[in-house]
Amino acid sequence: QKEVEQNSGPLSVPEGAIASLNCTYSDRGSQSFFWYRQYSGKSPELIMFIYSNGDKEDGRFTAQLNKASQYVSLLIRDSQPSDSATYLCAVNGKAAGNKLTFGGGTRVLVKP
Amino acid sequence: SQTIHQWPATLVQPVGSPLSLECTVEGTSNPNLYWYRQAAGRGLQLLFYSIGIDQISSEVPQNLSASRPQDRQFILSSKKLLLSDSGFYLCAWAPAGPHNEQFFGPGTRLTVL
């Protein structure tokens, strides 16, 4: 079992719809959870991070964390073609110290 | 505000040649620093990380090495490049703290021929 798992996609979403991305992790002691966006050929960009159970909203993005079920999700509301990218989930596990464990990423395609 | 620089942006090197990639961070002190590699179409592979000057942890045994001669400078090196060293090399920094949120530099795309 991978430490951080994501569906590789592609997740195809009509423009204006909600894109829902999921990420599961194996380290129950994980403390902080991150979502990065990576455009093709570019470096990852931190979108938001969450460390408490529940929802955290930032603009069109909402991160949801459920530590009991060991998953974190990202919702993108009013999806735009510019949201087409690969989204990486990363976890700061208790045993990892100063390191993050990244998932393989979910590719999102927003179609006009 | 904090800024992270990497150079060069692109590099084409022959097999067996040496390598030196540099990363510098501005606007912060005592950051954690990281080197990752991303092969084409693949995920991020952590190569090295550092929590302080001359404190380097290696994640993957290979022909690469890293050094941190100054607080905000991180260097990735190789004495002899292999074809398999081709990839997108990313430097990242994180503030010292409980959450370890990492911020990436623009990256260096290395092609070994």
Image (cartoon, rainbow, N blue to C red):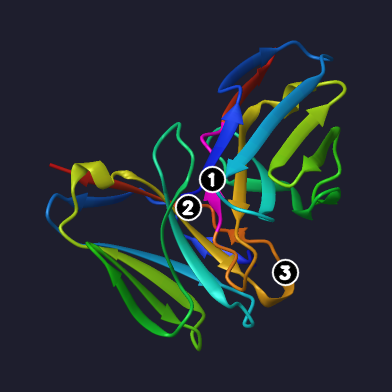
Q: Main secondary structure of the magenta part?
A: loop
Secondary structure of residue under mark 1: strand
Badge 2: chain ID: A
Crowd class of label 3 (few under 14; some 14 to 19; many from 20; radius 10 Å): few
Q: Are marks 1 and 3 in contact (CB under 8 Å)?
A: no
Name which of mark 2 and mark 3 comes first in the sequence. 3
Q: Does B64 appear above or below A52?
A: above
- Measured Cα–Cα span from mark 1 to mark 2: 16 Å
Q: Which mark is residue B104?
A: 1
Secondary structure of residue under mark 3: loop
Q: Position of residue B83 (x, y in %)?
A: 74, 21
Question: Is residue B94 in the magenta section?
Answer: no
> Which quadrant is the C terminus of chain A positioned in?
top left
Q: Are marks 2 and 3 in contact (CB under 8 Å)?
A: no
Question: Is residue A15 found left or right of A35 in the rendered image?
Answer: left
Task: Tell me the amino acid under the disc marked 3.
Answer: Gly
Residue toward you, B51 or A9: B51
Residue toward you, A59 or B62: A59
Q: Which mark is residue A105?
A: 2
Q: Does B69 appear above or below A16?
A: above
Please provide the residue range marked out in magenta. B102-107
Task: Tell me the amino acid under the disc marked 1.
Answer: Phe
- The residue at which mark 3 appears reads as A97
Secondary structure of residue under mark 2: loop
Residue at position x 60%, y 57% in the image = B94
> Which quadrant is the N terminus of chain A positioned in?
bottom right
- Measured Cα–Cα span from mark 2 to mark 3: 22 Å
Q: Which mark is residue A109?
A: none
Residue at position x 45%, y 83% in the image = A52
Badge 1: chain ID: B
